[in-house]
Amino acid sequence: MMSTETRDIIDTLAGIEPGSTLDGIRAKRVQARDNAQKSYLSLFEPIDASAFSLPERAAVALFVTGLHGESPVSTFYRAKLAAGADGARLVEAIDAEIARGETSGPYGSFPAGPLSVENTAGLIYRVSADRKSALGARIVAALEHAHLLVFRPRDAASADMKALLAAGWSDTGIVTLSQLVAFLSFQVRVVSGLRTLSAASA
């Protein structure tokens, strides 16, 4: 069920207080602010989480935000995952996978043609064999796909969809997973930018 919480998640993560200068700046773009909050609620407080459970969402969220570097955003999702059943074990496993998956990007290969000169090789991330059983096939596939979307989006292919399907993901779950990864990357950038503005104004 949707939460009745009215506090804007980006304001919370960026440390924006009501009535502050940054609050005023954000208020000038009401639609963008509202849409970001609605996206958060639909992804993390959905009416139906049957295709992509809340613990799975928290695990992917910690992984994706952790890949962007430690921040209030990753701290938030770490706490969200830790609060769930078996949370401490999952946090430990995800933190270890973040360390294994850290890299820079984007990179990958373009189709043969003029852009091929911009092809860049980089890490092809796979979850550690030692942690696959602890995380389960669905989360393993989700983490590997999330890493692909963050660092190698140009390499995404039908084989990657088949890997998710083989791990038990439905078409609906795959779409939501992709939306969640995109939202998290956006959220990290916005929060980082707002905190930088806040520090500069201080």
Image (spheres, rainbow, N blue to C red):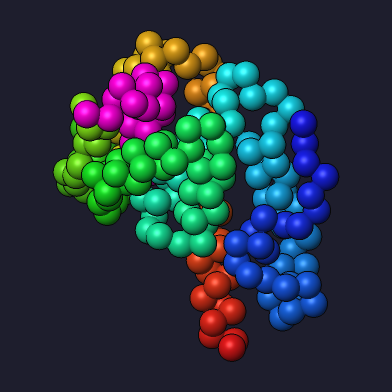
Q: Is residue 160 left or right of residue 85?
A: left
- As for residue 90 lying within the magenta part, the answer is no
Seen at 69% across and 75% down, the residue is: 22
> Measured along the vertical axis of the image, is residue 195 above or below residue 163?
below
Q: Residue at x 60, y 62 (%)?
A: 13
Query: Residue 92: where, in percent of width, then height?
Result: 36, 43
Q: Nearer the viewer, residue 96 or 106?
A: 96
Is 148 contained in the magenta span? yes
Start-end of magenta stretch = 130-151
Residue 178 vs residue 98, the one in the foreground: 98
Quadrant for the C terminus, please.
bottom right
161 sits left or right of 120 in the view = right
Q: Residue at x 58, y 70 (%)?
A: 194
Who's the residue at 22% across and 29% down the image?
Answer: 130
Query: Can residue 160 be seen in the rendering of this structure?
Result: no
Q: Which residue extends farthest bottom?
A: 202
The image position of residue 108, as x and y in percent, is: 25, 40
Is 116 on the left-hand or right-hand side of 75?
left
From where the camera sits, is residue 43 visible?
yes
Q: Does 133 sit above or below residue 19?
A: above
Foreground residue among 121 and 62: 62
Write down the quadrant of residue 4 in the picture.
top right
